[in-house]
């Protein structure tokens, strides 16, 4: 697709026939929206600032509604060369809505001018917009009028500038050397002082003086650098405010400075317990842009490793979840199991936690000789252990008493707050992308989607144990039916290109040289890929401007909205319930802050 | 040598015994810290400390050196006198309780008529250690831990005494030595099984051992009442906990398992074996159980244990009266 075809031809994606687009046109008129052809797999509609609020409300309230605000962020359009046919814009804010009942998505985009960066807040429509709007303010300086608490969320309060703007530096060498004066230190110290009012909390009510307990960013049960300030009456939580950003590394900004190929290892570290599971959505999105269809063997290898990492991540969850409930032993057992999983992963990829093993167009290497035996050993080992965990822990009266009806929420609440993955399925909502929108070859596998019923901390644990069983089933099918063939697609953009063919003639040599030094050049366009990652839905929304690097990399991670939901669940609970809930969410801060 | 009269000799021997028992208990408490870690390692499929000396035998020495030479830091926001007093109470109240334990027919510190009551009094004083420590630290986590500890102790002290009254009623005395002698035929664990069960539960609660370690719940309160303590002051809380374990185990053995009585082996061996078995039980509980919520711990005490001890006492009294009407 060249730049010239990037027009508003509806036929390009068939989006114009989409029932949602038809409904919107009927309600708001033909000129209210402009359909942008993309490779995202959903209608992408440009709408005016004046009408987008009404449209969101319409979409939220229509029959078979768009229950979830899946993602909200922005793009700095000022340096983008290939945007013919799109409305004039310096900045674009996009609203990605998801409908579980329709199993469809839609994206609304609003164009903004640099001198008028303001939009009405949609927190009243979708409560989970709160943190997303704060992030957009923090990263781009976009003002959301009517937002209850529009402050920085990922960057420190004293930060100057908005990091994801194109005029903000991306490397340390673009800044002056860092200095901290005594005066500067005092400013920083003052900014760290805790004033309950600034966090939207009261000091006292009806003669009761509250205690503020600062839990984190360094606390045994905070699962990383996570901070939550509790407003306590005795041990009852009156209110609480989570504070994130301590693990922010600017993964999205790095995406704009790394070639399509060399960004792969950065994705591993986003959900650092998920390993190659993070490569998956990124690689799928890049392959959409490149137009690569990978071989069957590559697909099955990818699925197998992704499921290995799902098990490894769930085992970590199970151990720490039970440890948060005060049981000290299970974590040692689950780590023994993880070691067994890592033996398989290490034998295949050569790495343990962060293999960065998927490649554009395939995988880094073919499977080693004898991999089946190692994998089968793990498959034979695990079922007995899972049974043991269920018998000794999930059937334990204390575990049940600590987790039953604790931090329970309904499917409706979950969708309102953007909850996905096992936490959503624990409420009984059957929404697993591997079934609902099979990607990367999952349609060929036979497995079930375990569901909970009560949406409480217990079901969140039980669902994950069951998911491990299903993952074992999938891996068994991979072992039994691994297709023969090549592990890399035969495509000019496959990176790195097959080395065997490199020395045949000058063309392949030059291609190889360019792709491993500069990196492959992808056609301009936008692509988005979602996967059912270990903790929920993880997606990469990539914008290519016809370069060796991404123009904008938006990473939507599941843990971010999961943490945002905590106050809504914990008000009125006790401190031990909060700890049980934190254990049951299964989050890592790298997945929240990126 | 006539200054060495008989009473003087007797009191010297008694003093020597007291010193030996004191040192023995403190040493045992210290050794237990390592034993517990090794046992946990065994049950958790890992090694535990095995690097210092052969089979990790010198781990204790390394720990002692470390804990003695750490900076003894008193936070500037702490209430100094109470902060210093708390660990001393923690250690002293439990050590003093050992006074009443008859180890063998010939060994023991004091033969008090109110032996059992003395233990109950000391257990009551012990809670001040936690309260003072938590309050004086000026730390919210410590305060929450202290609040939990006081609520918990209040709940469990009520029936820890009641659970023992069945034994007292059967033996007809508070004197520990006489209680042991009364068990020559039949250990009290048989007729007083519910008394034993409730005392075991309350004993774990009194020593803040898992699963009743809510005052220091690591996952919730990040160590609770002794969060601000370091060096030997922390060490005294730490060793105090193990001394408490030894004390409760020794008391269970004395009150319910016939003390030093047993065939073939010498009394001291029997006493040590029985006490050791309960110490291992303490460790095994920690390895195997999750932690209940602290308000459930309280309601369990009030709603279940207290009625059980009352019924137990009632039945015991009725049986004694029926068997031997006054």
Image (spheres, coloured by chain):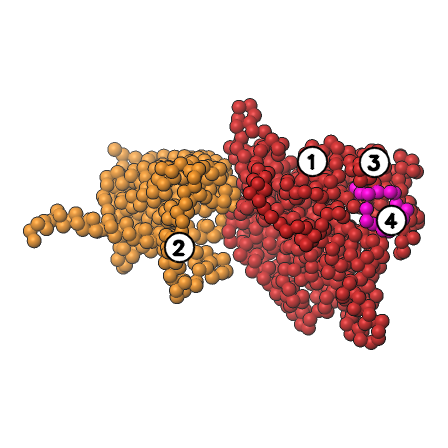
Cα–Cα span, label 4 and label 3? 19 Å
Numbered badge on residue A49? 3
Residue occupied by mark 1: A150
Q: Earlier in the sequence, mark 1 or mark 3?
A: 3
For mark 2, name the chain: B
Q: Secondary structure at mark 1?
A: loop
Q: Which chain is red?
A: A
> In front of the other: label 4 or label 3?
4
Specify start and end residues of the magenta stretch as a single range: A77-94
Which corner quadrant holds the C terminus of chain B? top left
Question: Which residue matches tag 4?
Answer: A83
Residue A546 in picture, x, y percent from top left: 84, 56
Please tell me which of labels 4 and 1 falls first in the chain: 4
Q: Are marks 1 and 3 on the same chain?
A: yes
Asked if the residue under mark 3 is in contact with the one under mark 4, i.e. CB atoms within 8 Å, the reply is no
Q: CA distance from mark 2 to mark 1?
A: 49 Å
Vertically, is A209 above or below A375? above
Subunit that carries the residue with mark 3: A
Q: In the rendering, which numbered label is found on residue B66?
A: 2
Do the residues at pointers 2 and 1 share their chain?
Answer: no
């Amino acid at each position: 697709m060249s730049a010239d075809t990037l027009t508003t031809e509806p036929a390009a994606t068939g989006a114009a026939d989409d029932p949602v687009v038809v409904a919107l046109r009927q309600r708001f008129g033909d000129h209210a929206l402009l359909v942008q052809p993309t490779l995202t797999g959903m209608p992408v509609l440009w709408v005016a600032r004046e009408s987008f609020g009404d449209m969101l409300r319409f979409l939220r309230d229509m029959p078979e509604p768009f229950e979830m605000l899946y993602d909200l962020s922005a793009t700095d359009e000022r340096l983008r060369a290939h945007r013919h046919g799109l409305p004039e814009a310096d900045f674009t804010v996009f609203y990605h809505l998801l409908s579980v009942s329709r199993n469809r998505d839609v994206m609304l985009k609003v164009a903004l001018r640099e001198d008028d960066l303001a939009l009405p807040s949609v927190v009243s429509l979708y409560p989970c917009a709160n943190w997303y709007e704060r992030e957009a303010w923090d990263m781009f300086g976009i003002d959301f009028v009517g937002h209850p608490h529009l402050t920085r969320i990922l960057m420190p309060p004293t930060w100057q500038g908005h990091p994801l703007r194109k005029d903000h530096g991306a490397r340390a060498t673009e800044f002056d050397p860092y200095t901290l004066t005594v005066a500067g230190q005092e400013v920083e110290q003052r900014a760290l002082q805790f004033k309950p009012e600034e966090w939207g909390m009261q000091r006292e009510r009806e003669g009761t003086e509250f205690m503020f307990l600062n839990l984190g960013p360094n606390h045994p049960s905070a699962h990383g650098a996570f901070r939550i300030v509790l407003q306590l009456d005795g041990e009852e939580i009156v209110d609480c405010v989570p504070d994130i950003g301590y693990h922010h590394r600017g993964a999205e900004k790095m995406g704009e400075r790394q070639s399509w190929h060399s960004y792969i290892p950065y994705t591993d570290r986003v959900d650092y317990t998920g390993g190659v599971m993070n490569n998956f959505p990124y690689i799928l999105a890049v392959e959409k842009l490149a137009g690569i269809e990978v071989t069957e063997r590559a697909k099955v290898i990818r699925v197998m490793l992704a499921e290995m990492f799902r098990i490894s991540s769930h085992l970590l969850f199970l151990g720490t979840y039970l440890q948060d409930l005060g049981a000290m032993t299970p974590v040692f057992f689950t780590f023994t199991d993880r070691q067994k999983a890592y033996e398989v992963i290490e034998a295949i990829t050569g790495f343990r936690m962060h293999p960065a093993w998927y490649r554009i167009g395939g995988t880094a290497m073919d499977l080693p000789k004898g991999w089946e035996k190692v994998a089968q050993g793990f498959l034979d080992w695990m079922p007995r252990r899972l049974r043991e965990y269920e018998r000794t822990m999930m059937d334990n009266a204390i575990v049940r008493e600590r987790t039953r009806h604790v931090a329970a929420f309904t499917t409706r609440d979950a969708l309102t707050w953007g909850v996905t993955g096992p936490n959503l399925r624990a409420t009984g909502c059957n929404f697993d992308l591997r079934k609902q929108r099979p990607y990367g070859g999952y349609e060929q596998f036979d497995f079930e989607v375990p569901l909970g019923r009560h949406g409480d901390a217990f079901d969140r644990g039980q669902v994950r144990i069951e998911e491990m069983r299903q993952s074992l089933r999938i891996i068994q099918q991979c072992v039994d039916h691994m297709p023969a063939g090549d592990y890399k697609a035969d495509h000019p953009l496959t990176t790195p290109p097959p080395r065997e063919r490199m020395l045949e003639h000058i063309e392949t040599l030059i291609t190889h040289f360019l792709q491993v030094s500069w990196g492959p050049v992808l056609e301009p366009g936008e692509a988005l890929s979602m996967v059912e990652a270990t903790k929920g839905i993880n997606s990469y929304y990539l914008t290519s401007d016809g370069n060796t690097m991404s123009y904008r990399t938006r990473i939507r991670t599941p843990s971010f909205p999961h943490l945002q939901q905590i106050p809504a669940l914990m008000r009125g609970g006790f401190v031990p319930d909060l700890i049980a809930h934190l254990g049951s969410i299964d989050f890592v801060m790298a997945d929240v802050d990126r | 040598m006539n200054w060495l009269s008989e009473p003087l000799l007797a009191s010297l021997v008694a003093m020597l015994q007291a010193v030996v028992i004191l040192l023995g208990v403190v040493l045992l408490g210290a050794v237990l810290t390592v034993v517990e870690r090794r046992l946990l390692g065994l049950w958790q499929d890992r090694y535990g400390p095995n690097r210092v000396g052969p089979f990790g035998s010198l781990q204790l020495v390394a720990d002692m050196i470390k804990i003695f030479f750490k900076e003894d830091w008193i936070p500037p926001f702490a209430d100094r006198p109470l902060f210093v007093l708390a660990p001393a109470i923690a250690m002293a109240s439990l050590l003093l309780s050992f006074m009443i334990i008859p180890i063998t027919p010939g060994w023991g510190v004091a033969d008090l008529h109110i032996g059992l009551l003395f233990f109950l009094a000391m257990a009551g004083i012990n809670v001040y250690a936690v309260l003072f420590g938590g309050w004086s630290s000026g730390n919210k986590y410590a305060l929450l831990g202290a609040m939990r500890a006081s609520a918990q102790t209040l709940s469990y002290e009520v029936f820890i005494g009641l659970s023992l009254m069945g034994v007292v009623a059967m033996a007809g005395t508070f004197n520990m030595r006489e209680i042991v002698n009364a068990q020559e035929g039949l250990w009290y664990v048989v007729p007083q099984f519910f008394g034993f069960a409730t005392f075991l539960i309350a004993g774990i609660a009194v020593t803040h051992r898992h699963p009743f370690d809510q005052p220091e719940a690591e996952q919730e309160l990040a160590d609770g009442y002794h969060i601000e303590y370091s060096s030997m002051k922390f060490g005294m809380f730490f060793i105090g906990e193990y001394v408490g374990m030894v004390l409760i185990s020794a008391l269970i053995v004395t009150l319910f398992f016939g003390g030093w009585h047993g065939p073939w082996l010498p009394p001291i061996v029997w006493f040590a074996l029985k006490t050791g078995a309960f110490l291992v039980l303490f460790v095994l509980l920690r390895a195997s159980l999750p932690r209940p919520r602290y308000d459930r711990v309280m309601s369990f005490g009030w709603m279940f244990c207290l009625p059980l001890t009352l019924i137990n006492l009632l039945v015991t009294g009725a049986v004694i009266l029926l068997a031997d009407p006054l």
